Amino acid sequence: MHAPQWLQVLVAAMLVMACAAYWLGRLFPRLGQKGWQATAGMLGRLHAPEALIRHAQARGRPRRKGGCGGCSGCEGGNCDPKS
């Protein structure tokens, strides 16, 4: 295989892996949180910029359940299911 073919295979494989990681995180949130925590630890060991480490740590924290996912018109941040 020539270099352009290898590059094409590499880009396609990376795209498939990124899609798989995204959907694993969406379908299994705990797995996604553990992945972000591991990424934050790896970035810390690699002495990555603090902004990247903080972003990975923030994504690895558990989130509150609920929210405005089903609302059609949240105004002013008040999304009360009873109203």
Image (cartoon, rainbow, N blue to C red):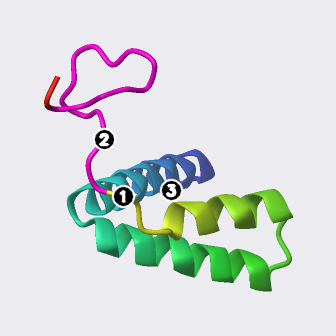
Q: Dividing the image into 4 quarters, which one contains the C terminus?
A: top left
Disc ID at residue 67 = 2
3 lies above or below 75: below
Q: Earlier in the sequence, mark 3 or mark 1?
A: 3
Tell me the CA gap for discs 1 and 2. Answer: 8 Å
Please state the horizontal and vertical placement of residue 60, each as a whole percent of the image.
51, 69
Is 68 contained in the magenta span?
Answer: yes
Return the residue at label 1. 64
Q: Do the residues labelled 3 and 1 touch (CB within 8 Å)?
A: no
Label 1 crowd bin: few (<14), some (14–19), many (20+), radius 10 Å: few
Tell me the CA gap for discs 3 and 1. Answer: 37 Å
Quadrant in the picture for residue 31: bottom left
SS for dot 3 = helix
42 lies above or below 50: below
Query: In the image, what residue occupies the spot 29% across and 33% down?
Result: 68
**Which residue is nearer to you in this view: 68 or 27?**
68
